C-alpha cells in the first residue's frame, strides 16, 4: 500500500545549514539535465532513418526521465522541512515523487535496448556504430542491476522509522537497526549533499542520505536526539503526528 506523507516546517532548527551540495541550489545542474533530452529529440526530428529515430526517441524518454527525477530529488529537500508518514509510528520518508522516479529511471533505461533490438530484428535503417549497437544494451544491464537493488531494498522499512525500540530503515540507503541504548550522537553532515550521521555503539557511524528521509537532516537529528534523551516521551512515538508535536513543543521551549 502506498505511504502518504505530510510535510511540515517546524522551527526546531534555524535553517542556517543548507540542504544542497556546497550550500547552493543546483540551478546549473537542473538546466543542463533539463536541456539534455532535447539533443536526441532534435536529432530524431532531422534524421530520416526510422530505425535511428526509434533509438533516439527512446534515449529522449530516458533523458527526460532523468531530468524529472533530478527535479523531484532536488525539490524534495528544503531547510527546516520535515516529511513524515501520515499514519502509524513516527517515520521520516521521502515524497511519492522521489519514490516513483527511483523505479522509473531503471525502467526507462531498458527502453533504448528494446528499441535497438527491434531495429536490428526488423532491419530498419539506422546509424551503424559500436556505441549505438552496444551502448543501449550496456545501459539495460546497469538498469537491471538498479531494478534488482530496488527489489532487494523492499526488505527494509521505507525511510527512517523511529519507535519505542529505536531506529529502523533506511530503504535504498545505509541500513540502520539500532536500539536507543546503542544510539550515540546524531548529527547532520556534508557539505556534498545533505546527510545524517548516526553513531551506533560498537559499529561504524551510519551515514544516511537525507533524500531517503525527505527531510532536513538537521531537523531529523534534533528530533531523534530529543527522543534519545527523553525516554519518558517515547510512548508518543506510536503516533507520528503526536510525536512531532511533542518534540516541537519541547525543542522550541
Image (cartoon, grey):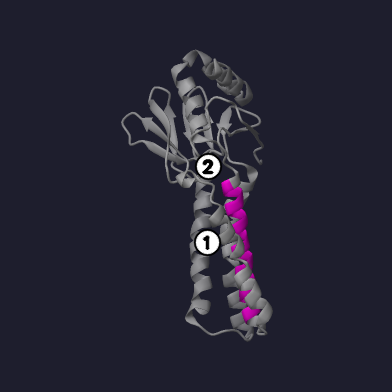
The N terminus sits in image quarter: top right
The residue positioned 48% from the left and 21% from the top of the image is 226
- State the extent of the magenta-drawn residues as a range: 52-74
Determine which of the numbered discs, if any, sits on residue 143 in the image: 1
The picture places residue 85, in percent across and down from the top left corner, at 62, 33
- Depth check, mark 1 against mark 2: the one in front is 2
The residue positioned 48% from the left and 43% from the top of the image is 23
SS assignment at label 2: helix
Q: Main secondary structure of the magenta part?
A: helix
The residue positioned 53% from the left and 78% from the top of the image is 132
Circle nearer the N terminus (1, 2)? 1
The picture places residue 182, in percent across and down from the top left corner, at 38, 26
Residue position for label 2: 212
Q: Around disc 2, counting alpha carbons within 10 Å, would you say few (fewer than 14), some (14 to 19), or many (20 or more)?
A: many
The residue positioned 39% from the left and 22% from the top of the image is 181
Q: Nearer the viewer, residue 55 or 15?
A: 15
Give left or right: position of 246 versus 221.
right
- Asked if residue 71 is among those painted magenta in the image, a careful observer would answer yes
Q: Residue furthest top?
A: 232
Give left or right: position of 41 versus 143.
right
Amino acid at each position: 500500500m502506498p505511504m502518504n506523507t505530510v510535510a511540515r516546517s517546524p522551527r526546531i532548527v534555524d535553517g542556517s545549514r543548507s540542504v544542497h551540495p556546497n550550500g547552493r541550489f543546483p540551478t546549473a545542474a537542473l538546466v543542463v539535465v533539463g536541456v539534455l533530452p532535447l539533443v536526441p529529440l532534435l536529432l530524431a526530428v532531422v534524421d530520416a532513418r526510422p530505425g535511428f529515430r526509434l533509438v533516439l526517441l527512446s534515449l529522449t524518454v530516458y533523458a527526460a526521465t532523468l531530468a524529472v527525477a533530478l527535479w523531484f530529488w532536488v525539490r524534495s529537500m528544503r531547510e527546516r522541512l520535515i516529511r513524515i508518514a501520515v499514519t502509524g509510528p513516527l517515520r521520516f520518508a521521502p515524497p511519492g515523487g522521489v519514490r516513483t522516479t527511483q523505479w522509473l529511471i531503471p525502467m526507462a533505461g531498458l527502453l533504448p535496448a528494446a528499441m535497438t533490438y527491434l531495429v536490428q530484428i526488423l532491419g530498419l535503417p539506422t546509424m551503424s556504430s559500436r556505441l549505438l549497437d552496444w551502448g543501449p544494451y550496456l545501459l539495460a544491464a546497469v538498469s537491471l542491476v538498479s531494478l534488482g537493488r530496488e527489489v532487494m531494498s523492499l526488505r527494509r522499512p521505507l525511510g527512517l522509522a523511529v519507535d519505542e525500540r529505536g531506529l529502523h530503515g533506511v530503504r535504498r540507503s545505509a541500513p540502520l537497526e539500532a536500539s536507543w541504548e546503542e544510539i550515540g550522537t546524531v548529527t547532520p553532515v556534508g557539505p556534498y549533499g545533505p546527510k545524517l550521521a548516526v553513531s551506533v555503539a560498537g559499529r561504524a557511524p551510519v551515514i544516511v542520505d537525507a533524500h531517503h528521509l525527505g527531510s532536513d537532516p538537521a531537523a531529523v537529528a534534533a528530533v531523534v536526539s530529543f527522543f534519545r534523551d527523553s525516554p519518558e516521551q517515547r510512548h508518543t512515538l506510536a503516533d507520528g503526528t503526536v510525536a512531532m508535536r511533542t518534540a516541537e513543543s519541547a525543542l522550541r521551549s
